Image (tube, rainbow, N blue to C red):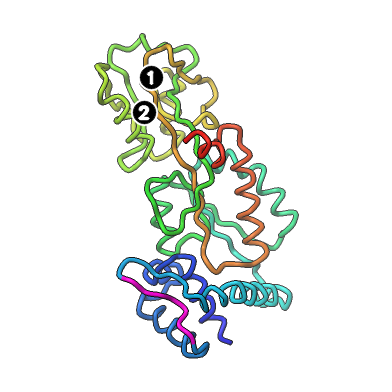
Amino acid sequence: MDTDLLRAFVTVAECEGFSAAGKVLHRTQSAVSLQIKRLEDQMGESLFERTSRSVVLTPPGGRLLPYARHMLKLQDEARRVMGVDRQGELIRLGTSEEQASTYLPELLPRFAARFPEVRLEVNCSISGSLVHDFQEGLLDVALVVRHGPTQTGRLLGREPMVWVVAEDRAIDDWEILPLALNPEGCIFRAHAFAALGPTERRWDVRYSSRSPTGINLPVQAGLAATVKTPRSVPEGCRIVGEEEGLPPLGHVEIEMHRTPGHSSDAFVAFCDELEHIVTATDSLESLEYVAAEG
């Protein structure tokens, strides 16, 4: 059985669509459709039920899926054992700089000890850009702040957002609240605007940067306030208390995107270990807690 056809099948099933699968596989939608048609001809069964809005597995497709995943995993293992991929597998991770600095120091040594031959490429950017890159097939896994529902994002939990200022700075020191924020497209910026908009407090974006360093420096110098999660409060700064009069910001949701059909032992272990480290973070509220609260 052609494993390329099986990989296309698994990817369509996990992406729930031919267009999204095509981006992951670096193929056109029509090419993926032809691959599925060839597999259906070989199986003698229809594997997907196609509607104008979605693509779902038929009962025969559901029976085939676990076997297809297992065969792809065996192929990946065979390639590794036979030394086909002599340079070592490459895993392309996308995440923010702050998430990387929080989670990777624990993840990297542990993962490298188990899979010393695997190469890791870390791409840091804002979440919206990372989701786009993942959907275009430029990343294998992305850990991001959820901006909206997608076909590939798996929710891990949520984190509170907090106002942050320098340790020696009081909010009342400013007649006009100066802000240091990421550019348009950042959900933290959007939450800051939404929270401050209905209030009578005057505010102004004085500093803007895609880099956490570009945000942190004016905040640490006492020149501006910003929005963070508790795990990302920079050195020399503090969380603004509720009694200081700034409006609440709510929560952000953290999600992980994993390339469908990518089933090597190293990739699965990397994603599982990263998820474990993220969900064990004190500031992350678990899905069970969120559901109970709701």
Near mark 1 (Cα within 10 A), the count class, few <14, some 14-19 or many ≥20, is some
Q: Is residue 128 magenta?
A: no
Q: Which residues are the magenta region?
A: 45-51
Q: Amino acid at mark 1?
A: Leu
- Vertical comparison of 38 with 143: above or below: below
Mark 2 — residue? 180
Q: Residue, x 33% and y 12% (percent of image)?
A: 174
Location of residue 165 in the rendering, given as x and y in whole percent from the top left corner:
44, 20
208 horizontally vs 231: left or right: left
- In the figure, residue 126 lies in which quadrant? top left
- In the figure, residue 196 lies in which quadrant? top left
Closer to the chain start, of discs 2 and 1, is 2
> What mark, if any, has residue 137 been given in the picture?
none
Location of residue 34 in the rendering, given as x and y in whole percent from the top left corner:
40, 84
> What mark, if any, has residue 223 been given in the picture?
1
Which of the pair 209/95 is nearer the observer? 95
Q: Secondary structure at mark 1?
A: loop
Location of residue 129 in the rendering, given as x and y in whole percent from the top left corner:
39, 51
